[in-house]
Image (cartoon, grey):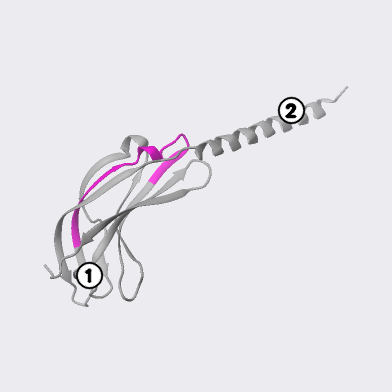
Amino acid sequence: MHSFGYRANALLTFAVTILALMCAIASLSDNLNSPSPSAEIQILNINWFQKQPHGNDEVSLTMNITADLQSLFTWNTKQVFLFVAAEYETSKNALNQVSLWDAIIPAKEYAKFNLHTSNKYRFIDQGHNLRGKEFNLTLHWHVMPKTGKMFANKIVMSGYQLPEEYR
């Protein structure tokens, strides 16, 4: 007959193996989700567009952000971090990114929203490159899972342009 220690070891090993298999299947099942988020950002007003005393351009925008990010949430999603960035090119840099607004979405119930807001962070260019500049507004998101790896994606919205003159 087998001793108590041998039987306890066999039972514990079997239980840990089953638990590891269940965790692997649960983690892989999250990969079957193919999210289809949607978003739209409208610039309602350019509150001001000015040159700062030390020569940098600064812009204040009023935006309307409409998004449906509910498809990003699964049983494994803890929260979603999202931010809106203005992206543009200058002669110095191929890509300039300025974060304008951000938020943390803690649950699926809050993932569909329509928000009227001004930029939360200052839109400043190091220099005087923004007059007449075309730029994109990009909604970036990072899905933070309860277990497993974090993933990120974005929606790029183009066709925005700043005025030629300061206001």
Image spot of residue 92 (x, y percent): 33, 76
The N terminus - image quarter: top right
Image spot of residue 112 (x, y percent): 29, 38
- Outermost residue on the right side: it is 1
Q: Residue at x 26, y 70 (%)?
A: 125
Main SS type for the magenta part?
strand
Using the image as rendered, state which of residue 61 and residue 121 is in the foreground: 61
Disc 2 residue type? Leu
The C terminus - image quarter: bottom left
Read off the residue under disc 1.
Answer: 130
* Residue 119 against residue 133 in the figure, above or below: above
Read off the residue under disc 2.
Answer: 11
Using the image as rendered, state which of residue 155 and residue 97 is in the foreground: 155
Q: Residue at x 25, y 67 (%)?
A: 124
Which secondary structure lies at badge 2? helix
Disc 1 residue type? Leu
Q: Is residue 76 magenta?
A: yes
Mark 2–mark 1 Cα distance, whole angstroms, equals: 68 Å
Image spot of residue 108 (x, y percent): 36, 36
Q: What is the span of residues highlighted in magenta in the rendered image?
A: 60-80
